[in-house]
Amino acid sequence: MAQEDVFKKIVSHCKEYGFVFPSSDIYDGLAAVYDYGQNGVELKNNIKEYWWKSMVLLHENIVGIDSAIFMHPTIWKASGHVDAFNDPLIDNRDSKKRYRADVLIEDQIAKYEEKINKEVEKARKKFGEAFDEAKFRETNPRVLDNQKKRDALHERYSEAMNAMDLNELKQIILDEGIVDPISGTKNWTDVRQFNLMFSTEMGSTADSASKIYLRPETAQGIFVNFQNIQRTTRKKVPFGVCQVGKSFRNEITPGNFIFRIREFEQMECEFFCKPDTDLEWFDYWRSYCHNWLLNLGIHDDNLRLRDHAKEELSFYSKATTDIEYLFPFGWGELWGIADRTDYDLTRHQEHSGKDLSYFDQEENRKYIPYVIEPSLGADRVALAFLCDAYDEEVIDEAKNDKRIVLRLHPALAPMKAAVLPLSKKLSEEAGNIYAELSKHFSVDYDDAGSIGKRYRRQDEIGTPFSITYDFDSKEDGCVTVRDRDTMEQTRIPVSGLVKYIEERLEF
Ligand code: GAP
């Protein structure tokens, strides 16, 4: 099946099974804004809970906070968001569609890379075992030609982006002959800057109202509390501060369902360390984050760690790695790990006039700590877990027996178990089991339809254990537990159920 179709199926599955609904659905939705349904909210809460446990509870030198969404407007001046949190936009006069100029150029770079890869694959098929890819790339004239064009474009583009030279970005689009995918024309406007922050007014009268912003990242709430947290925890560097919360960006090219949206949640950690130890901590967080995803069952084949080249780094960053996931629509950034140096604290020190340096007693000197920031989007990683878990399994080809199963890690599954009485006559006893398990986990109860149909409904929302209470249960005090992935059934004493499930939720 084409990956595009797989993605369509995942999106409709999410709506059909109460994971994600378009926001304001009965009013035909609001662009790039989504609501989480009964299963989606459990999944997202589990992700946030396991992130919090791994970051805050498992590190004795990390604490958490919850800062306000509204913050003093100068914070966004200091952080650079007022002046530099911009996308370069270009409109096509014929289609009346708006595009990000940088994305149009990046797509063009990708086209050269695709051409090169196609040549390589063609040659691999032709020469079979004897194929020497490195030599082919070094010598084939078509590959060399496309590589030259790609590198020249990449260099020109990087320079234009670093200087935010809008005229040059437009010139690149014209020189490369990039056409609008809808109208097919090159009738482009000039490139303009567009700030991604949402703003609103605070204050009751027009005179006293001041412009404030909805935060575009949670990180700044941590930086501006650095002094408060260090003073009240008396933590010594290195220490970290985490928070989970909503962020807002007026994205120009939102899309791919909940991958790029305008209201989203971030899980961010700002890890403060000694200036000369930053790269060591950067490596630590790079592999910690990678392992976190693997431990929660994401297939490693679908992950890659992409180090930013020098010209791609943000102006304040010394090193950045994106952990990317292979979504059905292609590779996309999941988790950004950045060495932000002392940029943010220094800027806030300058703009607030407050001393944000740290006194290192061991070294008997003051310095502004460096910061390593692992930043993960809760919605984006939820989408990655859903894509990774979605499976259409053929059980019996001849009978056309198939099932959709979400193979989510049990720790993330919205429901940990479902209690299914074999007959409505057993609802009192099954109800007691449900009541007991509900004290420990999120549990579903379903007594409608055949047992086979009920199992399938649980597979579709990823419930790892379905517990059937039957007529023998009354006699032997046991229930049948069906495993979602293997469909194997095991007889287990009711008294051992909590332990049985608990052991399987560990990650
Ligand atoms: N404080 C650093 C920061 O915000 P970022 O790369 O802009 O860095 C970090 O965002 C993470 O937040 C991304 O890797 C992604 O997972 C998530 N994210 C960013 N913009 C998003 C959007 N529009 N929709 C959903 N998730 C988003």
Image (cartoon, helix red, strand yellow):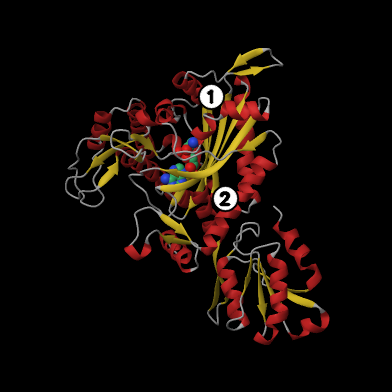
Asked if one can make out residue 19 in the rendered structure from this viewpoint, the answer is yes
Residue at 53% across, 79% down: 400
| Quadrant (top left/top right/bottom left/bottom right) for the N terminus | bottom left
Q: Which residue type does callout 2 highlight?
A: Asp
Q: Residue at x 34, y 46 (%)?
A: 253
Which residue matches tag 1? 341
The disc label shown at residue 301, or none: 2
Q: Amino acid at mark 1?
A: Thr
**Left or right relative to 147: residue 64:** right
Q: Nearer the viewer, residue 274 or 348?
A: 348
Real-space CA distance between mark 2 and mark 1, rounded to the nearest whole angstrom: 31 Å
The quadrant where residue 27 appears:
bottom left
Of 221 and 166, the residue lying toward us: 221
Which element carries disc 1, helix, strand or loop? strand
Instruction: Give the class, few, some or many, for how many residues have Cα within 10 Å of label 1's Cα (few <14, many ≥20).
Output: many
Side of 162 where 344 appears, left or right: right
Category of crowding for the residue at label 2, using alpha-carbon neighbours closer than 10 angstroms: few (below 14), some (14–19), many (at least 20): few
Q: Is residue 162 above or below residue 507?
A: above
